Image: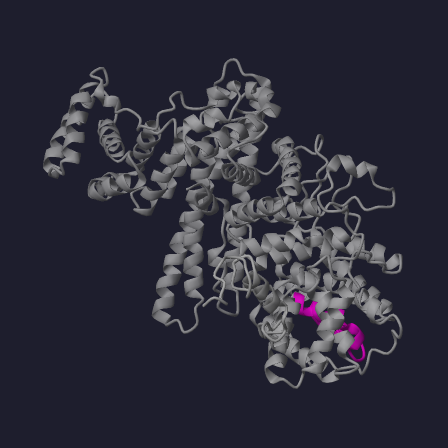
Amino acid sequence: MADIDRRNGSGGGGGYRGGYQNNRKRRYRDDDDFDRNRNQRRRHEEPPHVKLRKQLLGLAESPLKTIDEELKDISKLIVENYSDERLRENFLEMALQLVHEQPFKIPFIASIFLISNNEKPILTEDIIAKAARALQTQAREGLWREAKLSLRFFACMQGLLENDGVFPLLNELFSRAVDLQTAFTDDGLGLELIKIIQLTIVYLMASSASGFEQQASALLENTDVVASAPHPLLPLVDPYPGSKEVNDHEPQSVIGLLQKQLSDEAANGWPLASVPRPWKFLLAQNPEDQGPKHALPAIELPTTVTSKIRPRLPEVYFSVYADQERETVPSTKNISSVIFRDALVDTINMLDYNRNAAAKFLIDLDTFFAPDTFAKRGTPFDKLKELPEDSSTWKPEDVLVDAVFSQLLQLPNSEHKLVYFHSVLTEACKIAPAAIAPCLGRAIRYLYKNLGDMDLELQARFTDWFTHHLSNFGFTWKWTEWVDDVELSFAHPQKAFIAGVLEKEIRLSVVGRIRGTLPESYHRLLPASDEEESPPFRFESDHEPYAPEAREILKLIRSRASEDEIQAQIDAIQQAAAERGLADPALPAIDVYVTCVVFAGSKSLSHILSYIERCKDRLLTISAAGRAGQRQIIGSVMQYWIEKPGIAVNIIDKLLNYTILSPLAVVEWALVDKLDNGEILNRSYIYEVIASTTYKVTNRVRQIVVARNQAGMMPEQLKILDETLDKERIAMAELFTVIEDALKGVAEGSADGMVENDDPDEEEQKLLRTWGGRWLRVFRRKMAVEQSWTREMLNSPQPQEQDANNTTVQEDMADAVE
C-alpha cells in the first residue's frame, strides 16, 4: 500500500491536476484513440430530373449568374441525360408550360434548343412537335393568348425551322382576321389576330434567323390595312374623353401604335434593342452552324375562328407616366413600350391564381430583357438626371406599375376581378416598398390631376383601388397636398373623388380612426359622430308624424307578432295620412314600416338579412303594388343610412336579389326622383348603385345566352329560352332608355332642376353638365358592349362558356370593400 500515493496531483497520473488531465489530452492527440476521419454525413446527389427542374424554373431570374452559363448548364444536363424517359418528358412538359405561363422566358427557353440542336437534334424535333400540337388545340378552342405565346416560341426558334418557318402560318392568320373584319367592321377578334401577327414579327426578326426582311415587310404591308384604319368604337374606350382643348390625351390603339413602331424598326434595320438575344453569346464562334433544320408540322387554322374570351372593343394604350419631365417608361414612339407591356400583361393575367408569384416576376422584370435596358433598380426619380446621357432612365418599377394600372383601368372591362390587380400592387409594394411606393405616389398624383378628363368608370375604379390600397397601409397619405381642393364645390371631380374615398374608407374602418389620419379641414366631410352605434330611430320623438304607430310596429316586428297586428297599425297610419290630404297615403305607411325593419336590423349585415327574410312577404306585397312603393322602400333605406350610404347600397343590392326591388325602380329613384339639377351624379355611391343594378340586368341576359348556346339543347328548351331572352332584352333596353333620357337632360342643361334655377352659377352649371355627359358616355358604352356581345354570341357557331363571367367595377368593388 505504501507504494500507492493517494494525494491529489501526485504521481501515476491519477491526480486531478496531474496525469489524468494530461492523459486525456494525450488521448485526444493520439490518432489510435481518436479518429479524426470518422464518417461524414452522406451527401445526397439530386436526381438529374430534379436538378433540371430547379434550373429551368430559376432560368434568367438570378442576377448573380450569367445567362449564358445557365443555358450551357441546362443544355449539357439535358443532352447527357436525354435517354432518361422521366427527365425527357418532364423537361418537354415544363418547357412548354413556362412558354405559356412565364412569357418573359420564351427567348431563353428557345435558346436551350438552339444550343442543343447540334448534339441532340431529336430534342428539337420533340419540342417542335409538342408545341405544334398545343398550337393546333389552342387555335381550335379559341385560346388566342396561349396561341400567341406558342407562335412567339416558334418565332424564337425560326433559325432552326426549314424554309419560311412561321411566315406561312402568319399569312393564313391574317386571312382569318380579314374575314372577321369584312363580316363585322366593329369585330374585336380580328384586331386581336392582327396584334398577334405584329408581336410575332418582333420576335422573328430578333431570332437567330436571317434573311427574312422581305417576308416581314410584305406581312407588315398587309397588317397596315387593318391596323391603320380608324375603328368606329375607339372613342368609346378613350380613358380621357374630356375636352381636347385642355387635354392632349388622344386615344392610341395598340395595333395602330405597334404598326408605326414596326415600320420604324424595319426602316432602321430591325435593331429591336430591348429584346433579349441570349443565343448571340453562345453561337458567336460559329453562328451559321446551328445544326440540322426541322420542318414545322402542318397547323390547320379553323375556317371560322372563335374566342373563349373575345375582346369586344379595340385596345387602347394607357399610361400613368405620360407627362413626366424625365422618361421613366418607354415613349409610345419606342417599340419597347408595347414589348414590355405585352409580356407584363400576359404574366399578370396568366398568374391570377398566385398574386405573390405575379408580383415577384414583375419586380424581376429587368433580368428578362437585354442588358442595360433599364436603370438600376430602386434609382430615385430625382437621381435619374445624374445618370450619364447615354444611360437608360427607364425604371423597371414604373414599367410594372404602369402595366398593372393598364389592366386595372382597362375599358370596357378588365379580364379579372379588379381586386386581383389591387392585390398585385399591394404585394409588389410589400416586396420592394422603397422602390414601389414612390412610383405609386407619382401614378396617384397623375390620375388625380386628370380626374376631370377621365372616364367616369375609371374614376370609380381608381377610387376603389386607392381606398383599398390605403387600408392595407394604415390609411396614410399626404392629404395636405390636396387640402385646397376641400374648399371646392362637390361638383368638382377632385372634391367628389376625395369625398368618395373618405366614404369608402369608413366602410373599411371606423370614423374615429379615419379622422385621426386626416388634417382638420377634411373633418367636415366625415360623419359628425365617431361612435359606431346605429343611427337613432327617428320615430322616438313624438314630434315626428306617425311616431306612436311606428314604435308599436317596431315592437311587433321584434316580437314576431302576426301580420294582422302589424296591418292594424299600418291602416292607422294610412288613415292619418289621408286626413292630412296626402295624395298617396300608402307611401307614409311604407316609409314607417321599412324604417322599422332597417332599424331593427341595423346591428350587422346578418341582422338586416334576418329581418328582410322575416318580413319578406309584406315587402313583396308592397313591391307588387307598383314601382312607387319600391321607390319609397329605397328612399327609406337611404334616409336611415344617410351618413353611411355604403350600408344602404348593400341593403338595396340584397333587396334586388330578393326581387323585392326591380332594377327599373332603382334607376327611377336615383335618376328621376332625386335627379333635380344633376348634383346627385357626383356622389360615388349613386354611381355604384346604378352600375351594380345594370350589371345584374346585363348579366342575366348573358346567362340566358350562354345557356341557349349549350350543345344538345332540345327544341322545347330552346323555345323557352328564346322567349325568356326576348323578354329580358326588352327589359334591358327599357332600363338603358330610362338612363339615357334622364342623363341627356343633365348633359344638355335641360333637366327640370337646371331650367328652374333662377340664379345659376355658370361654372357650377358647366360642371354639372359635364357630370351628365360623363355618366351618359359610360352607360352608352355598356349598352353598346352588351348589344355587340349578344349579337356575336347568337351568331357564334360554337357554344361559348366564358363570357358570362366577365367582371365589372361593381362586382369587384364589392369584393374589395366588403
Q: Residue at x 62, y 25 (%)?
A: 481
Quadrant housing residue 655 = top left
Q: Is residue 109 left or right of residue 289?
A: left
Q: Residue at x 41, y 49 (%)?
A: 697
Image: 61 above or below 815:
below
Q: Residue at x 56, y 18 (%)?
A: 487
Magenta segment, prevailing SS (helix, strand or loop):
helix
Q: Is residue 778 left or right of residue 381?
A: left
Read off the magenta span. Answer: 149-176
Closest to the observer: 465 or 569? 465
Q: Is residue 302 visible?
A: no
Residue 686 at x, y percent in the picture: 44, 34
Residue 764 at x, y percent in the picture: 56, 21
Image quarter hosting the C terminus: top left
Image quarter hosting the N terminus: bottom left
Q: Is residue 285 visible?
A: yes
Image: 454 above or below 24:
above
Quadrant housing residue 466 = top right
